[in-house]
């Protein structure tokens, strides 16, 4: 994308300094991804003393909360685990489903935390679900609308692009309390049921904190992108 690195000025193309905001966001995301992978890999080698697999632990957590209607499925991939509130299905990845590690058990319990949130109609989760279609549309349409507005010098289109991208940022902001709360619920259940011992709980907390950092980094990167849009829009207004 031309605007990613350069802007068109009265005397040709020149370097766009706002591109550094993108680079910073990318570096934050890469750092967070590296931390979560290294932490998960470390504790995926630590066998759970209860000898439970991720799937078995998930079933115990769900049953202990009366969520007998939530089924568990195996999906491919690493850390692609998620809970689908529409079909009431907990999907656990290759790295979680059959593994009997501390990492697998805590990741499975975290996803159960989302099922518990769904059961209790946890406010931020309900809000996030409501924002999904708006956020998807906003993240897809924001840049095309924004660039079209710059090319045609139509400020309403430029502002529309910023508003659309703001919807995606808002979705990521709402995601933070949802993820932190799911982790807190997971740790509480793992402790109360004795599925993880005290030393294992420490490892589980480290895995979940590392995973949470990926959401924080993603939000920071998106905020930087939003700031970049605002700066670019301001620069065009000054030239106009």
Image (spheres, rainbow, N blue to C red):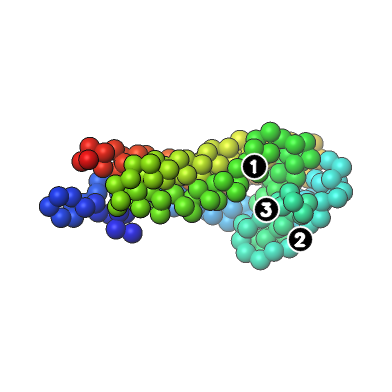
Please provide percent x and percent y for residue 139. Answer: 49, 50
Residue 136 in sight from this viewpoint: yes
Q: Residue at x 82, y 51 (%)?
A: 70
Res 1 → quadrant:
bottom left
Q: First in sequence: mark 2 or mark 3?
A: 2
Question: What residue does disc 1 label?
Answer: 130
Question: What residue does disc 3 label?
Answer: 82
- The mark lying in front, picked from 1 and 2, is 1
Question: What residue does disc 2 label?
Answer: 73
127 with respect to 68 (left or right): left
**Label 2, label 3: how many angstroms apart (C-alpha)?**
10 Å
Q: First in sequence: mark 3 or mark 1?
A: 3
Res 129 → quadrant:
top right
User: Within 10 Å of the Cα at label 2, are there few (<14), some (14-19), or many (20+) other Cα atoms?
Assistant: some
**Label 3, label 1: how many angstroms apart (C-alpha)?**
18 Å
Q: First in sequence: mark 1 or mark 2?
A: 2
83 with respect to 235 (left or right): right
- The mark lying in front, picked from 3 and 1, is 1
Q: Residue at x 29, y 47 (%)?
A: 153
Which residue is nearer to you in this view: 69 or 207?
Answer: 69
Res 187 → quadrant:
top right
Please provide percent x and percent y for residue 151. Answer: 29, 52
């Amino acid at each position: 994308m031309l605007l990613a690195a350069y802007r068109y000025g009265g005397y040709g193309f020149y370097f766009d300094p706002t591109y550094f905001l993108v680079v910073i966001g990318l570096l934050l995301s890469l750092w967070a991804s590296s931390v979560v992978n290294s932490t998960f890999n470390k504790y995926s080698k630590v066998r759970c003393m209860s000898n439970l697999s991720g799937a078995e632990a998930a079933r115990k957590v769900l049953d202990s909360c009366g969520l007998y209607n939530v089924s568990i499925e195996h999906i491919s991939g690493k850390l692609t685990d998620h809970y689908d509130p529409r079909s009431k299905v907990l999907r656990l990845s290759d790295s979680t489903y059959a593994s009997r590690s501390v990492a697998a058990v805590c990741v499975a319990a975290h996803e159960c935390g989302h099922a518990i949130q769904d059961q209790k109609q946890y406010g931020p989760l309900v809000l996030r679900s409501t924002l999904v279609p708006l956020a998807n549309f906003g993240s897809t349409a924001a840049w095309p609308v924004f660039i079209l507005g710059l090319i045609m010098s139509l400020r309403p289109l430029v502002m529309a692009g910023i508003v659309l991208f703001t919807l995606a940022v808002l979705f990521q902001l709402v995601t933070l309390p949802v993820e932190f709360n799911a982790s807190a619920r997971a740790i509480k259940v793992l402790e109360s049921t004795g599925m993880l011992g005290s030393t294992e709980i420490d490892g589980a907390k480290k895995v979940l904190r590392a995973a949470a950092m990926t959401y924080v980094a993603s939000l920071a990167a998106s905020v930087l992108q939003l700031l970049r849009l605002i700066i670019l829009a301001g620069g065009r207004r000054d030239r106009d």
